Structure formats: C-alpha cells, structure tokens
Image (cartoon, grey):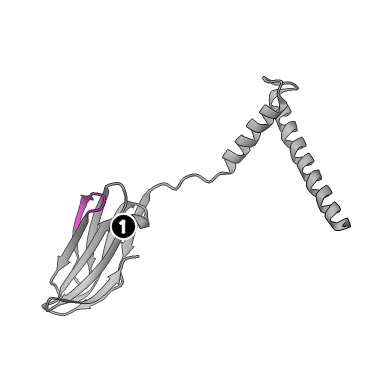
Amino acid sequence: MTIKLFRRVRVLLVVVVVTFLVGASVFAQDGQFGTSNNIFARMNAKLDQILASLSPAAPQPAPVTLSTGPLSMSQGDTFECYLTNVSSTSLELTIAARGTTSFQHGPDAVAPGANTNLGTFAAGLRHCEFSFVGFATDVRAHATVDSGGHTVAVAEAR
C-alpha cells in the first residue's frame, strides 16, 4: 500500500514539475500575461513546439548503389542484370555489369512497376551494380547466369 501511494505521489510530482517548467517557459517567452490570457492554450502551444522539435524528419531520397555478389560464367553462358522499380515514382537508373570487362547502360528512366535489364555474353567473373537516387527499398534487383536456356545461378542485389 505504501509503495503504491509513493508511486502515485511521484507521478503527481512529475506532472506538477513538468507543468511548472512549461508554464515558466511560456511566461519567459511571452511576458507575464503574453498575447493570450489562457495559460492552458499557451502551454498547449508550447508543448506542440517541443514535440515538433523532437519528431524525426522524414527520410529524404539519396544516391543508392546496390550490388550483387559475383557470379562466374563460361563461354556461351549469358549474364544478365535485372531490376524492377517497385516504388510509386520514376527512377533514373544506371546498370553496370562489372568484371574483367565492364558494360554499362543508362542513365535511363524506369517507370513505376517497369523492368529493365543489361546482358552480356563475355565469359568471366561478374557482378551487377544498380545506381539511382531514392531508397534501397524502391527496387528489386538480381543477376543471373543462364546456360543452355536454363538459369544456373542467381545473386540478389543488396
């Protein structure tokens, strides 16, 4: 019983102190009576300012480069980099197939829901790079190696 009473008194004391601090801040900013005689309206406005300053800003689009792991391909195999735009906005995209020799395509606009790809037949160890401005979650991308009409390897872009 004593512990519950102590907790209630402690909570009440915290509420009173916070109310006093916000009220003192309002008076210090506006003068003794300020522009409004309603102390609760001014305190509410001050609390709204405090909450707004503590709220995190919305994330902004930034340059993103996603890469796949390397895949090995032999002569006669096909290496392809695939991307689907799953966002609601168009993206300016550059795709590169990197390896012993590199191939690059873009920048090209990829509409929401659209797919694009870059392929090569040159043998060797390769990986794909997808560069755009946005968020990593805006796309789904991967690389594949096809041999004899069958997909033999896939690497997801991260």
Give left or right: position of 28 versus 141.
right
Q: Which secondary structure lies at badge 1?
A: strand
Nearer to us in this view, 79 or 35:
35
Residue 50 is inside the magenta segment: no
Residue 99 seen: no
Give left or right: position of 124 versus 42.
left
Q: Position of residue 131 (x, y in %)?
A: 29, 56
Q: Which residue is mark 1?
A: 139
- Vertical arrangement, residue 58 with respect to residue 80, above or below: above
Three-letter residue code for mark 1: Val
Give left or right: position of 130 versus 52.
left
Q: Position of residue 70 (x, y in %)?
A: 28, 74
Nearer to us in this view, 68 or 125:
68
The C terminus: image quadrant: bottom left
Q: Residues within 10 Å of mark 1 (few under 14, many from 20)?
A: many
Give left or right: position of 1 versus 135.
right
